[in-house]
Image: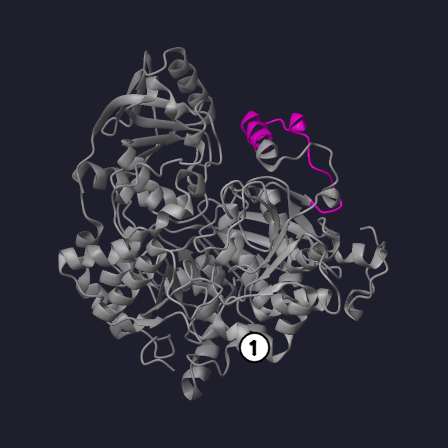
Amino acid sequence: MEKVSTITGVAVPFRRSNVDTDQIIPAVYLKRVTKTGYDDALFSAWRQDPEFILNQPAYANPRILIAGPDFGTGSSREHAVWALRDFGFRAVISPKFADIFRGNAGKQGLLTGVVDEPTVERLWAELEASPGMEATVDLVARTVTVGNATVPFEIDDYTRWRLLEGLDDIGLTLRDEQAITDFEARREAWRPTTLPAR
Amino acid sequence: MTVAYTEHRPRTLAEKVWDAHVVAKGENGEPDLIYIDLHLVHEVTSPQAFDGLRMAGRPVRRPDLTIATEDHNTPTLEIDKPIAEPTSRKQIETLRANCAEFGIRLHSLGDIEQGIVHVVGPQLGLTMPGITVVCGDSHTSTHGAFGAMAFGIGTSEVEHVLATQTLPLKPFKTMAITVEGELKPGVTAKDIILAVIAKIGTGGGQGYVLEYRGSAIRSLSMDGRMTICNMSIEAGARAGMVAPDETTFAYLQGRPHAPQGAEWDAAVEYWRTLQTDDDAVFDAEVFLDANELEPFVTWGTNPGQGVSLSQTVPDPATIVDPNERAAAERALEYMDLAPGTPMKQIPVDVVFMGSCTNSRLDDLRAFASIIKGKKKADGVDVIVVPGSARVRLEAEAEGIHTVVEEFGGEWRFAGCSMCLGMNPDQLQPGQRCASTSNRNFEGRQGKGGRTHLVSPLVAASTAIRGTLSSVADLIADGHEVDPRFRTIEGATV
């Protein structure tokens, strides 16, 4: 995974709450067997509306999405993260994320920062006053800067450390392989096994 | 690192199962490493995970704790022919190749154990109390009905579990959802969970494991408990659980992979300890009066946007929170509904009876008990999709397929089908559907399709009357109904 520290780029004031992963990427795009090439799929239903914010020239090359609460609810599809990433997004800011989405994002180098609702309203107002304005998300300082406003965001220490270091989860876990083997040795016999098939 | 066995502290059910799976305790804000007892795999969220293993040269650590089935893309008609849609076929073929390469048991289309992954695990007796279950599917919460800790994961985590049989996880908070009382006839598990979600909201369970408790939960069958736990994710929770009891043990005993003999006895002895201790404290508590519940239905585009069927489409102008108000306005526009419209006046084009929420034998029996000997409303398509090939055969042994066909409905083969329309089963733009599935998101059942989430009983009643309806409405119309519904009071409820 690539290291993440400071992200600067066009920020999108995304005035929507409860953006579920079926909206981020409809199921019809989940039939692919690759991990990249999902940029065409991002918000595909909404993008058919010419008025949709990501169709506006000012937001042609966005890097930061600033959304309403309950972002990423619903299906566990990691394709939602891949689609945001392939479209160019490197950070999403919201007052509240769905758990699975946030976990998936952290494993793919997509930064998710939490700020409260009044702060999101303030960032939206700043961005809407100057469409296409750049913002900066600083993972070291845990701040978002939009124009003259610099506000803190929340991200847990462990995810932040992994993003800053670009660490691979499986590699981290395999440091504990002996503990896994020891645990397996004391598992009870009644626990299920799928093989041999009965 | 130390292993945590904190057996003297009063604990909730979720904490007991968690503690029993800690491989390595996280320190300084690091997550715990949690052992996974059962990993369920399907074709949609696994191809990139297997690719990752191949690139890193890693094997699957425990093929004997892993099982795969084909469900999301599988057709529900003409299953003996090659899958017509090339990308769906490719995804299925990729799963077959990956399972063969990595030694994973797979139940393919045409196999008696093929079906929706969350129907297959329980029917094989693989899902049991006190285990951890994961799958690259958010509705893995279903398996919590057995007192298992079961949750959905993303593809990176699928790869992680394939490689290590563990996941690094931070402990969840715990929330008690207590439902006391007796459900009225015509009110079901689906109505309980829709009411819970409307009460706490689609983000209300975020960060929590929900434990469903109380007399109304105890009185449910395993199929009903699975319906409730299934939709925990729709309240934002990763997992939902019900403590195991005699209903659980009776369901499991004798199933192919349930423990046998002395192992069964040892397991049941342990499973009986999987109750929340009397003095344990939940991080949050919610109460619901089962006596007050009515059939519930959604009007909007997220599962929290629901009301009792006897009510009207709400007016967004009365919603205080600006974000929620905007979401409601957008939802009504998408759903083409006007505020104040009685829910029961809303006509539908399609009734979908199926999905991992409501496609088990109890669900099909409930649906069939209402439609038996009747004809569907003109202009309404009725599609019935059993959750697995085995459920389909069991239903056929009871004659349910004949009941559906004589009603004018379609009796299909097993799979996820119109819950998310990855196969050809999709709504057309503008079509309105009463669906026993779990998500009413925009375009979920087909681009431009409009979804109302309902119970199997409401689905059946709606299929007869053509508008969203309850069993009570059938009685008011003078229909003969199954004797157990004749006690319904006030036929216009």
Q: Secondary structure at mark 1?
A: helix
Which residue is drawn at the image coordinates 59% and 31% (left, top)? B333
> On the rendered structure, is B367 left or right of A184?
right
Q: Which residue is mark 1?
A: B394
Which residue is drawn at the image coordinates 48% and 50% (left, top)? B233
What's the residue type where badge 1 is placed?
Glu
Q: Is residue B58 magenta?
A: no
Query: Looking at the image, is A13 positioned above or below residue B219?
Result: above
Instruction: Locate residue B177, reporting x and y percent.
Output: 58, 53
Q: The numbered mark 1 sits on a residue in which chain?
A: B
> On the rendered structure, is B111 left or right of B399?
left
Query: Looking at the image, is B374 positioned above or below residue B112?
Result: above
Residue range in magenta is B308-330
> On the rendered structure, is B393 left or right of A161?
right
Res. A122 visible in picture: yes
Number of numbered discs overlaid on the protein picture: 1
Instruction: Locate residue A162, reporting x and y percent.
Output: 22, 42
Q: Is residue B319 magenta?
A: yes
Instruction: Locate residue B158, reporting x and y percent.
Output: 30, 57
Instruction: Locate residue B47, reporting x and y percent.
Output: 28, 57
- Colour scheme used in the picture? one colour
State which quarter of the image contains the N terminus of chain B. bottom left
